Amino acid sequence: MQVVPVEEPQRYGVVVGVTEQPAPASGVVVGVLTEQPGGRGSVESLGRWKEKRSDSAMPIKLRAVEDTETMVRVGFGKLVDELVQNGASGGILAVRGGSPGWCNVSWSASPDDTSYQRHGSVDGTASTKHGNVRFADFEGVVDDLGSENRMAVYRVTLPSGGLDRWKWAGRPPPPAPADLYTGPRGDGLLSTEEISGDYSAPCICGGDPPFPIFCNSMTVVPLGADTIETWRTGCCFLPPLMIAPIAQGWVWTRKPGTNAFLNGQRAAPMHFSTTFSADGTARATQRCGSFKKRPGSQKRAFQKVETRDLAGKWCGLGFVPFVPYWPFSHIKCTTKRALDEDRYAESGLACVLCLPIPISATRTRQYVNGHPTNGFAGGSLNDNDPNLVDQWHRDPGCAAGCAGLPFSDEVGPWPFFAKKVG
């Protein structure tokens, strides 16, 4: 069942009220709902506190080398889960970030925990505001992510009226209606609705150094005025060095004042900007080759994949594209179980070189500017993996992404594909 407008004429680029109906209308953001009113919790800054790499004041429970915001949200959600389980009213969240892209996250489900004070406070505790992580059911913001030897500490208090168990506590507030608008613009730029559709390209170049990718297909859907989600497939063919199928989802963000969209996703085999034109051409500006919108292509709207629909048995293949390393490709058979609307648990086995490797990980939906995507981040093997692996879902029965080898901490540009089989 999909969420679509009711009793509205077909309109492009208009955000309307939603309820359940069998099919979506064109040009409407599907699956994005407004939060219901109710009591809210709070996030209160307790300032910066000294930290030592060799002697952490609080146990480090999450380590991330990329996508700091997602990991802060994951840590926040885990803290709230523990608070609910323990019947506690509040707890402590601590974030220590270093060079761009990495951070350590700690938390305590005890409201009276003062272990973060063990190494002393920072003189002149003015925080460096370089974050804007907000939560749907909580007032306040995580706007300081700390530094290499400094923790930014927050007190988290649960809403007095409780929480909806099917709602992930780490999700952002819903975007404003204006942020969901995808229709015609007044600045002369192409709208994301005009860009949306199905594209193809006989051959493009990707990677660094560039390598040829043949039989390319790309679907573009809007996530607001300046953001799009894409699903791409192709085949890397450079014998005898590389032969591999490729599939991946990405979120691209508009370069201000242009029709170029920047691909900054981690673990992507191709990092570049793509410029869209009114004639239906999409050209990768740092690489060779162009996509062309397919004849008869229709405008597309975002379709949110529900975690309930992902539940079941999955089988997939992690493919190493370098021909001499094909034996290190691995098969995965797992079971997915929905935890809430933005998280699912995945457990099962991977097999590489005939060796079984257990998998037990939680995957969490990624949000961009408050908008849900169909990308889910989580550790490759378990929740302690420092690198996140993206699984993008084209629909409830097909997933793909980039992963590393099952026994490696490196994410790597290795394509992964999976199908729901039961």
Image (cartoon, rainbow, N blue to C red):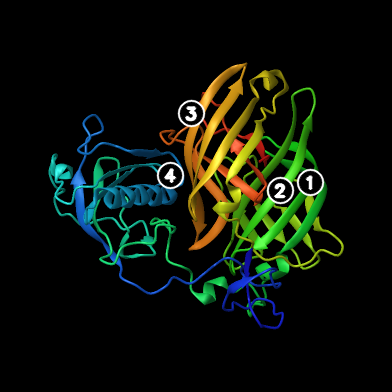
User: Disc 1 marks which residue?
Assistant: 216
Question: Counting other residues with Cα less than 10 Å from the Cα at mark 2, is it few (<14), some (14-19), or many (20 or more)?
Answer: some
The disc labelled 4 sits on which kind of residue?
A: Gly
**Contact (Cβ within 8 Å) of mark 4 with mark 3:** no
2 or 1: tag closer to the N-terminus:
1
* Label 2 secondary element: strand
User: Disc 2 marks which residue?
Assistant: 232
Quadrant of image for the C terminus: top right
1 or 4: mark nearer the eye: 1
**Contact (Cβ within 8 Å) of mark 2 with mark 1:** yes
Residue drawn 69% across the image and 42% down it: 247
* Alpha carbon separation for disc pair 2 and 1: 7 Å
Q: In this view, does 397 lie above or below 304?
A: above
- Depth check, front residue: 195 or 98: 195
User: Disc 4 marks which residue?
Assistant: 101
**Contact (Cβ within 8 Å) of mark 1 with mark 3:** no
Question: Counting other residues with Cα less than 10 Å from the Cα at mark 4, is it few (<14), some (14-19), or many (20 or more)?
Answer: few
* Alpha carbon separation for disc pair 1 and 4: 30 Å
* Alpha carbon separation for disc pair 3 and 2: 25 Å
2 or 4: tag closer to the N-terminus:
4
* Alpha carbon separation for disc pair 4 and 3: 16 Å
Residue drawn 54% across the image and 31% down it: 348
The disc labelled 1 sits on which kind of residue?
A: Asn
4 or 3: mark nearer the eye: 3
**Contact (Cβ within 8 Å) of mark 3 with mark 2:** no
* Alpha carbon separation for disc pair 1 and 3: 30 Å
What x and y, as percent, mark residue 274? 68, 55
User: Disc 3 marks which residue?
Assistant: 409
